[in-house]
Image: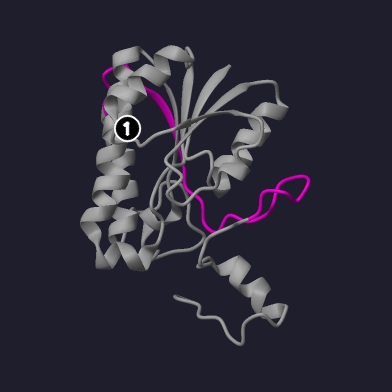
Amino acid sequence: MRILVCGGAGYIGSNMTAMLKAEGHEPIVFDNLGTGHISAVGHAEFVEGDLADYELLVKTLKKYKIEAVMHFAALIEVGESVQVPLKYYRNNLSNTQTLLSAMEARGVEKFVFSSSAAVYGTPKEVPITEDSPKEPINPYGQTKLAVERMCYYQSQTGKLRYAALRYFNACGAGNNASLGEDHRPESHLIPLTIQAAMGKASEIEIYGT
């Protein structure tokens, strides 16, 4: 299957690209390299572009005869989302609407959306289930939930078949340890914890309980 991997130069997207390739699919990576790295793309076809570019999206979907889209391209820093919320609504929500519009124009219906456990906010009960209340407490989580709802309503038209993946703290570096997290500067809990354990940091801050 020919699959467009948006954000395929990032951490989760690059791991998915490698797995798709290993399973015999044809991943085409679409990324603006704002936070991703070209070195993570591997041997997959690469298109440098931004999800705000509707014409380029339509052209790419047509050129590569895309059959499905996996969407990992997003801004993900919770603290930053509170400081500059409009940046997150533009990048995470508006750009996804542009992507879905391009898909609709080309008749591409299969869609996997990289959502987040941030859509749950502070849970009233644990463990969290898929049906637990969705009450995000920051703009980042709000944008992820808004995209999920947009996908739901688009699916009701019969023009979209989608799945939303709500991660907590993703970790790992692939089967050969070649595709680990590479944020610059690093801001994610698991690599920061490892750095502290290795003596590269004197302390770590953990938000929440």
Where 144 sits versus 189, above or below?
Answer: above
Residue 176 visible? The answer is yes
Q: Mark 1 points at which residue?
A: 151
Where 113 sits versus 3, above or below?
Answer: below
The amino acid type of the residue labelled 1 equals Cys
Instruction: Give the residue at the far bottom of this rendering.
Output: 202
User: Helix or strand or loop: what does disc 1 sit on?
Assistant: helix
Residue bounds of the magenta highlight = 154-180
Whole-percent x, y for residue 202 in the image: 61, 87
Query: Is the magenta region chiefly helix, strand or loop?
Result: loop
For image coordinates 24% across by 62% down, the residue present is 84
Residue 137 magenta-highlighted: no
For image coordinates 56% across by 42% down, the residue present is 38
Colouring rule applied to residues: one colour
Whole-percent x, y for residue 59 in the image: 36, 17
For image coordinates 46% across by 45% down, the residue present is 33
For image coordinates 41% across by 18% down, the residue present is 61
Q: Residues within 10 Å of mark 1 (few under 14, many from 20)?
A: many
Q: Nearer the viewer, residue 34 or 187?
A: 34
Q: In this view, does 36 lie to the left or right of 94?
A: right
Q: Nearer the viewer, residue 109 or 61?
A: 61
